[in-house]
Amino acid sequence: MKNLEEIWAKRFRQYLKELFKYLRFVFATSYIAIIIAGSFAVAYYMKWLQVVPHDFPSELLVSTVCGILLSFSSPTTLIREPDQVYFLQLESGMGSYFKKALIWTYWSQIFGVLVIYIAAIPLLLSVESPSLWKISLGFCTILILKYLNVQIEFSNHRKQQGRYHFFNRLLRLCISIIVLKLAIEGEIILFFVIIVILLAYEKQDRKKAILEPIPYDYFSKIESARMARFYRFVSYFTDVPFLKENISRRAWLDFATKLIHYDQKNTSLYLIVRTFMRTDESIYLWLRLTIISAFIVAFVNVPFVVWVIVSALSFATTYQIKHMFISPRGVRMNAFYPIPVTNQQIAVNKLLRTLMLLQSSIVLLSSFVQTVSFISFILILIIGEMTIRFTGTK
């Protein structure tokens, strides 16, 4: 129906506008780190290809990585909660709407898999030396498997509404790995037999799904969860005012608050430390960037690259956590206590310096994997302290 196609087109434009609005902040704040990390990864990969053993299971590795990515094919429907009322009379014509949704889902997800497969071709040539037609068959297989995964996952959502979803995805993951491996190895007969069976199954599964009523409420929840994940990712780079924070109790970390001396002047420090420990966004941000820094120091043997990345991650860690607490979305419990407002900034700085020391200590311990170096340890402390002192407080 033309009306539904217009609704999809309007929502799709709004969706892209929202997507690019926040993605530009991500790339604007981290493009240097992306370029450095990407350049290093390419250089390390090319160097590793020269010494990769001939018995390395390259076909299995490529098939597994691509198969995992292919199996994650959650549909982008752009369905909203009010649609369960307003779309009831249009349900018979929703096929055209979902067709456009699945086309976008396919093309938005396929490129990442193809990039990884193309990047893995030198590895396949170094170890197995497959012919061009086998590599081309693997490429075409990815296109076919992605279509099947998108269609089957959508049908499963429509029929089961989340029931048995894990087993459905696990089964598709295993089948995708097997089929892609058969294609790369050139096992034509078995490959085509499985593909024909999968195509027949997908067609029958789609027919059964069409007979089921459209679970608008369920699709709207999937869409809300997908966008929440996107906003949570973007929140690591810029402020997302309407993002709700996830809170977890984490009773095993209560010892940290018990270390704070019971005194009125430590009220802000107690509240901020407890908020940091119980807010998923803040504690996971610190853990993630600390683990990345430790991994880089442990396994990258190019000192300059290590120092640049560790410094960038130290700045990102300190700046983002500081921003979480001094922004309007930060701690507001202090307003209920008769203490100076400046105590909050002092408490935030104490928390940041403690986190800096913990991060630098973990990075120092990780350097024992190669050669012990205090440079990264010192850089984290210096960059973190400069970030605390010279970045804005409003």
Image: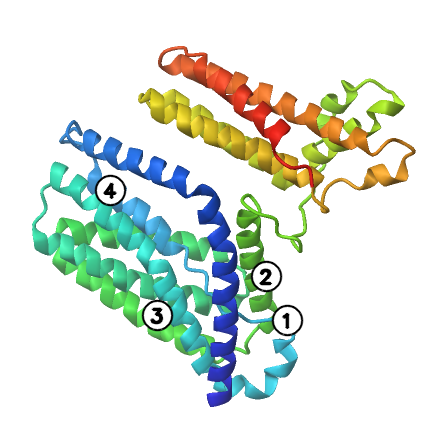
Amino acid on which disc 1 is placed: Glu
Name which residue lies at 56% across and 68% down: 219
Residue 224 location, quadrant: bottom right
* Amino acid type at mark 3: Glu
Q: Are marks 3 and 2 in contact (CB under 8 Å)?
A: no
| The image quarter in which residue 304 lies | top left
Which of label 1 and label 3 is nearer to you?
A: 1
Label 3 to label 4: alpha-carbon separation: 25 Å
Residue 275: assigned label: none
Q: Secondary structure at mark 4?
A: helix
- Gap in angstroms between the C-alphas marked 1 and 4: 42 Å
Q: Residue 30 appears at what percent x and percent y?
A: 45, 42
Which residue is tagged 2? Answer: 224
> Which badge, 1 or 3, is on the more N-terminal residue?
1
* Distance in Å between CA atoms under marks 1 and 3: 28 Å
Residue assigned mark 3: 202
| Residue 394 seen anywhere in this rendered image of the structure | yes
Q: Which residue is mark 4?
A: 60
Q: Are circles 3 and 4 on residues that touch, CB within 8 Å?
A: no
Which element is circle 1 on?
Answer: loop
Q: Nearer the viewer, residue 370 or 25?
A: 25
Q: Residues within 10 Å of mark 2 (few under 14, many from 20)?
A: some
Q: Quadrant of residue 271?
A: top right
Q: Mark 3 or mark 4, which is nearer to you?
A: 4
